[in-house]
Amino acid sequence: MQRELLNKKEIDELLLSLPRWEVKDNKLQRDFRFQNFVEAFGFMTQVGLIAESLNHHPEWSNVYSEVTIKLTTHDLGGLSTLDIKLAKLINKLVKD
Amino acid sequence: MQRELLNKKEIDELLLSLPRWEVKDNKLQRDFRFQNFVEAFGFMTQVGLIAESLNHHPEWSNVYSEVTIKLTTHDLGGLSTLDIKLAKLINKLVKD
């Protein structure tokens, strides 16, 4: 999978097409809230399958109905086009 | 599911039967390391099913092959017998 490190200007522009995501500590982050654990873990399973198929995996945490996802490209040392790609695919899994 | 809050002495005694778990910030915590994401998420799926069946869910995070699980009983304000039960069931899923 081709990946290119993004500069700040590129990130700012790309954020406009990624509603509800923000950059914190140089990671692309979004919080998700579901009705219950079954919904939250169902979402995580979908994300897990996508992440594995991209060979690009999130840093993420879950407490009952809440999921926080952080994306970064560790070996490039910042945000890359692959983080944007994964974030867009994740956004397609949820309604808003 | 019956749950009873545990006092410090009870927790110390129970930790003896819970290898690799420790108490941090009043939560029962263990780190797990797998070969890769597929193994880590497979483990998380097993834990998720058990947690849902107990109606007692972990606080947990995952980065690629590493999973950290924290257990506490929020509505009782500390560690309970249910956290011990879940920790023991989780230990059965892994080799060591």
Image (cartoon, coloured by chain):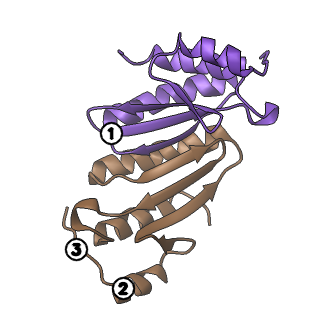
Chain colours: A purple, B brown
Is disc 1 on the same chain as disc 3? no
Which mark, by number, is residue B8?
2
Tag shown at residue B4: 3
Image location (x, y in percent) of residue B88: 43, 67
A34 to A83, vertically: above or below: below
The picture quadrant where one finds residue B48 is top left
Classify residue B27 as left or right of residue B32.
left
| Both marks 1 and 2 on one chain | no
The furthest residue to the left: B2
At horizontal 50% and vertical 62% (from top left) the residue drawn is B92
Name the kind of residue labelled 3 in the image. Answer: Glu
Q: Chain of mark 2?
A: B
Q: Is residue B35 above or below residue B9?
A: above
Classify mark 2: helix, strand or loop: helix
Neighbour class for label 3 at 10 Å: few (<14), some, many (≥20)? Answer: few
Q: Quadrant of residue B84?
A: bottom left
Q: Give the quadrant of the N terminus of chain B.
A: bottom left
Residue B2: x and y in percent read 18, 67
Circle 3 or circle 1, nearest the eye? 1
| Residue at the spot of label 1 | A65
Circle 3/circle 2 CB separation < 8 Å: no
Q: Amino acid at mark 1?
A: Ser
